[in-house]
Image (tube, rainbow, N blue to C red):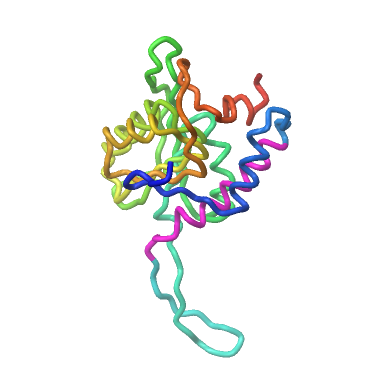
Amino acid sequence: MTTLPANVHLIDHPLVQHKLTLMRKKEASTNTFRRLLGEISSLMAYEVTRDMPMQDVQIETPLETMTARVIDGKKLVFVSILRAGNGILEGMLNVVPGARVGHVGLYRDPKTLTAVEYYFKMPQDMQERDIVIVDPMLATGNSAIAAVERLKELNPKSIKFVCLLTCPEGIAALHRAHPDVPIYTAAIDRQLNEHGYILPGLGDAGDRIFGTK
């Protein structure tokens, strides 16, 4: 895609693209896949948090007192869509260790491809927080849409969606339902197949992260 859809941020840094290529290979082991996902997630976190608000604080250097800038990581919440989202979560927390963490449990009904919720646990005072939803794949968009709908009930300050891979169908579906939610991704692949998998893709991210297939 030569022109990016509105509100889509493609993170095309050479290190991200190199590691993604290694992850796509079918011969990549579970250990390799998991390690690379963590590394890519840390790199993507720099772009995702680029516009985080900062505040001034007084500190002492070895030589004098100065005013310096810090972010308040406790105002940021990474929300993992279980289970594959946990593969991105660790890399993000390496960059922003002070962030809070929430979990949304969703599974895809194999017949209807719709998202079914089975778990939801968030930090308190979500109306004061910025949310970053993490899930390796934005495919049909059903899980992302369901997660955003649920989180909007908590009235957070903002919501972003971060994925490793997406496709035109997934972007269109999420934007139809939630045009205010920006998407951050490392790649926009060609299309979905009839089973709701991204092509060329990298297979089932959850199975490859946890070695369950």
Q: Work out whether residue 203 or residue 96 is closer to the camera in this orientation and state it.
A: 203
Quarter of the image with the N terminus in it: top left
Inspect this view and state whether residue 125 appears.
Answer: no
**Residue ID at (27%, 44%):** 180
Does 26 sit left or right of 205 as displayed? right
Q: Is residue 38 above or below residue 29?
A: below
Does 13 sit left or right of 212 as displayed? left
Q: Does the magenta stretch include residue 49?
A: yes
**Residue ID at (46%, 69%):** 70
- Extreme front residue here? 2
**Residue ID at (61%, 41%):** 20
Q: Is residue 140 above or below residue 63?
A: above
Which region shows up in magenta? Answer: 32-53
Our reading of the magenta stretch's main secondary structure is: helix
Q: Work out whether residue 150 or residue 189 is closer to the camera in this orientation and state it.
A: 189
Q: Where is residue 115 in the image (x, y as percent from the top left)?
A: 39, 21
Q: Position of residue 86 (x, y in %)?
A: 55, 36
Q: Is residue 192 magenta?
A: no
Inspect this view and state whether residue 72 appears.
Answer: yes
- Extreme bottom residue here? 63
Quarter of the image with the C terminus in it: top right
Q: Is residue 103 above or below residue 41?
A: above
Q: Is residue 51 above or below residue 113?
A: below
- Extreme top residue here? 111
Question: How many labels were placed on the picture?
Answer: 0
**Residue ID at (54%, 49%):** 92
